[in-house]
Amino acid sequence: DLEALEQAFQQRIDGGEKIEPQDWMPEAYRRTLQRQMAQHAHSEYVGMLPEGAWITRAPSLSRKCILLAKVQDEAGHAQYLYSALESLGLSREQAYGQLLAGEAKYLNIFNYPALSWADVGMIGWLTDGAAIVNQVPLSRCSYGPYARAMVRICQEESFHHRQGFDLVRRLAEGTPAQRRMAQDALNRWWWPTVMVFGPPDEDSVHSQRSMRWGVKLYSNDTLRQKFVDQTVPQVLHLGLTVPDPDLRFNPDTGHYEIGRIDWDEFNRVIRGQGLCNRERIASRRRSWDEGAWVREAAACHAVKLAAGPQG
Ligand code: FAQ
């Protein structure tokens, strides 16, 4: 019966076994993964936009090549994740439909504009830095296809993170105007990045169940703290200032303590009222519509191939 199946399933998870697409799984486990993995895939896909806007304006050929490769990697990450989602019975059309209808979320951070070249560095250094902290544990999560997709994704994010830091360091070591540009970008990206890890643990509706199922291995606040502890010393090393007057190092705990996070802003942004939400979805809708002929041609080609040489 169902209860016995669920117990056996939980035992497999507790024993560290991976769940594979053909295995039995509770419907709620499937739906939780569909929601989180779709949100993750959409984040990679929408995440191409803020930096993508700077490809034509990169200040040198080498920076342009790096940025092109990074944005292309993000498209690749979205591809793996949309494919992994198919293994849970959610097709690309369905996942995409949910994004365009505003039913599926993507990370808050991608609704902020990249106003200057320094913002490109901040996205790599801070956003990819946050993504690594969140995703390294996901490479040990209970669902096999999701965990395996994370391995390569994390390796690529690690390159993204370093190129972001390198870009910001060049500005921080540059002219006074370049330093100001870096500080201004840090002031705008710091708090939205700290929010990336999601609501505080007491308001995180999904955490408890997701952690029992091994879909999440650490709580939102635990990962946020890890990011702060590893990033603040980097900010100080660059001679920049964290835009948080309440930030302090607690020698007793060995952790940095941050000021109050503006959760009203976070909630507004994830409900569609951030600075760029409309623009982001409009841009993705345009790509979907303009790509219709490619999908039709690919489907037609697949039918011909399946029919064999005479077909
Ligand atoms: N933004 O109960 P919880 C990248 C929602 S790509 C928007 O704590 P959960 C690479 C949450 O969905 C990104 N919404 O939820 C790159 C839920 O709403 P729902 C890679 C958020 O799922 C870099 C509600 O709040 N990583 O970075 C956010 O247990 C640079 C309640 O929250 C991922 O996508 C948020 N920040 O924990 C690309 C992470 N936080 O669904 C380009 C994968 C929470 O009920 C440039 N996802 N919400 O309507 C996760 O790890 C989890 O889903 C969390 C949230 C930790 C985000």
Image (cartoon, rainbow, N blue to C red):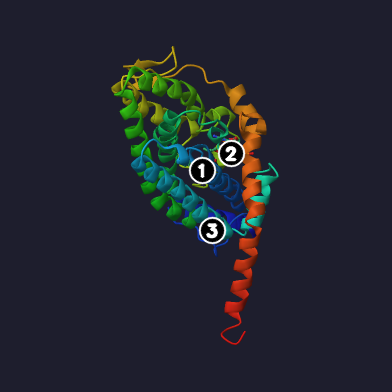
Left or right for 157, reference 276: left
The numbered mark, 3 or 2, whose residue comes first in the sequence reads 3
Q: Which residue is mark 3?
A: 83
Per the model, the C-alpha gap separating discs 3 and 1 is 18 Å
Q: Position of residue 171 (x, y in %)?
A: 34, 26
The numbered mark, 3 or 1, whose residue comes first in the sequence reads 1
Q: Which residue is mark 1?
A: 48
Question: What residue appears at the point 43 percent right and 50 percent down from the top-left corner?
Answer: 150
Q: Is mark 2 within 8 Å of ligand 1?
A: yes
Q: Is residue 112 above or below residue 131?
A: above
Q: Is residue 206 visible?
A: yes
Q: Position of residue 127 (x, y in %)?
A: 45, 35
Q: Is residue 134 above or below residue 226?
A: below
Q: Amino acid at mark 3?
A: Ser
The 10 Å Cα crowd at callout 3, few under 14, some 14 to 19, many 20 or more, is some
User: In which image quadrant can residue 22 be found?
Assistant: bottom right
Q: Which residue is mark 2?
A: 206
